[in-house]
Amino acid sequence: MKTILVTGGAGFIGSAVIRQLINETEHHVVNVDKLTYAGNLESLLSVSNSDRYHFEKVDICDAKEIKRIYEQYQPDIIMHLAAESHVDRSIDGPGEFIQTNIVGTYNLLEQARHYWVALEANKKASFRFHHISTDEVYGDLEGTDDLFTETTPYAPSSPYSASKASSDHLVRSWQRTFGLPTIITNCSNNYGPFHFPEKLIPLVILNALQGKPLPVYGKGNQIRDWLFVEDHARALVLVATTGKIAETYNIGGHNEKQNIDVVKTICELLEELAPNKPAGVDKYQDLITFVTDRAGHDVRYAIDASKIAKELDWMPQESFETGIRKTVQWYLDNQAWCQHIEDGSYQN
């Protein structure tokens, strides 16, 4: 039984990791989250009363507070998920991405280094810093058959992906230079329950239910490899607890889909699961609206996840068809959660 510190634990992926840790393991969890707009403690209501769960509202850029948390809780593993993550927001305002994703990661690493050096031998030997990153650091795939591997050169396209690439480099350098035991994972696009509604899949679901336009960039031909968030959470816990130090593991869902096909699939599911449409809507697909493409938009991402399958015996349990049905149904069943996002009350 270990103490695992999760940064960004009130976010989409972080909350899934914490639910996985509390529900499926005996580990203690410390959730460190600044609670920015995308942090939502309602996503953790099912586990928040556990005596193995602790929450600290702290900015990862606050060195003094991070030092206190390390010393107070004595973590065995750090799972670093806290990040600004929305590409459009990074284009509109890159500064916050530089601060959180780069400076924040540096601060966590440096405080972890001082904490780790002072540990007793056994605890020091088992300590690890797991940095959770994205496939967007690799840039764009040219062809239709090639895949991102753990050795694909970095070529980030947006301020978001550039800031995540920078944080990956910092993590590797702290391992090489100082010996800090680190692991990195790079994942494909996540989807599933509790996803903040600015992202494609929840945005389409909620807009459709309200009879609003379903915005699709360009022609919608961008291809993403979709990974169900609970599959990702299982992989992250596996890597954090059994992965090899200084290694990188790519995590993908083996589900490449064009954005337009994702949107059409959601519309088809809503025809079945929510047949009572808003006034004036004949078919949900009629709401699809093509908009000007995003600046520097990568066309295709796809992950080769054979390494984690071979070395750690992980495979996704959900296909896109099963995962997207679960996701649409979850949003239909959890309108209160969605309403609290839209009216801002979740931030209280």
Image: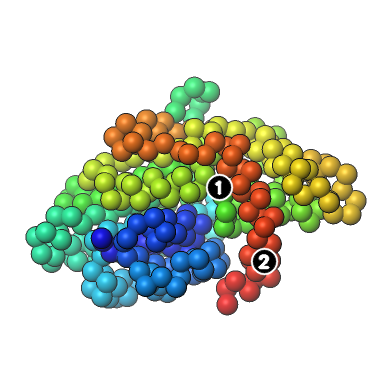
Q: Residue at x 23, y 73 (%)?
A: 71
Binning the other alpha carbons within 10 Å of mark 1 as few (below 14), some (14 to 19) or many (20 upward) gives: many
State the image coordinates of residue 281 (x, y, percent, origin top left): 87, 48
- Residue 270 percent location from the top left of the image: 74, 45
- Of labels 2 and 1, earlier in sequence is 1
In the picture, residue 185 is in which quadrant? Answer: top left
Residue in the foreground of this view, choosing between 247 and 142: 247
Q: What quarter of the picture does the C terminus occupy?
A: bottom right
Q: Which residue is mark 1?
A: 191
Say if residue 155 shows up in the picture: no
Instruction: Answer above or below: position of 293 versus 163.
Output: above
The answer to whether residue 316 of the structure is visible from this angle is yes
Residue type for callout 2: Ala
Residue found at x 39% / y 61%? 22
Name the quadrant of the N terminus.
bottom left
Residue visible at 26% across and 41% down? 247
**For mark 2, does the 10 Å Cα neighbourhood hold few (<14), some (14 to 19), or many (20 or more) residues?**
few
Considering only vertical position in the picture, is 302 above or below 199?
above
Query: At 34% across and 40% down in the image, what residue appears?
Result: 249
- What label does residue 336 carry, if any? 2
Viewer-nearest residue: 160 or 225 = 225
Q: Amino acid at mark 1?
A: Tyr
| CA distance separating discs 2 and 1 | 19 Å
Please tell me the numbered disc located at residue 329. none
Foreground: 92 or 193? 193
Of labels 2 and 1, the one closer to you: 2
**Figure coloring:** rainbow
Dot 1: element:
strand
Secondary structure beneath label 2: helix
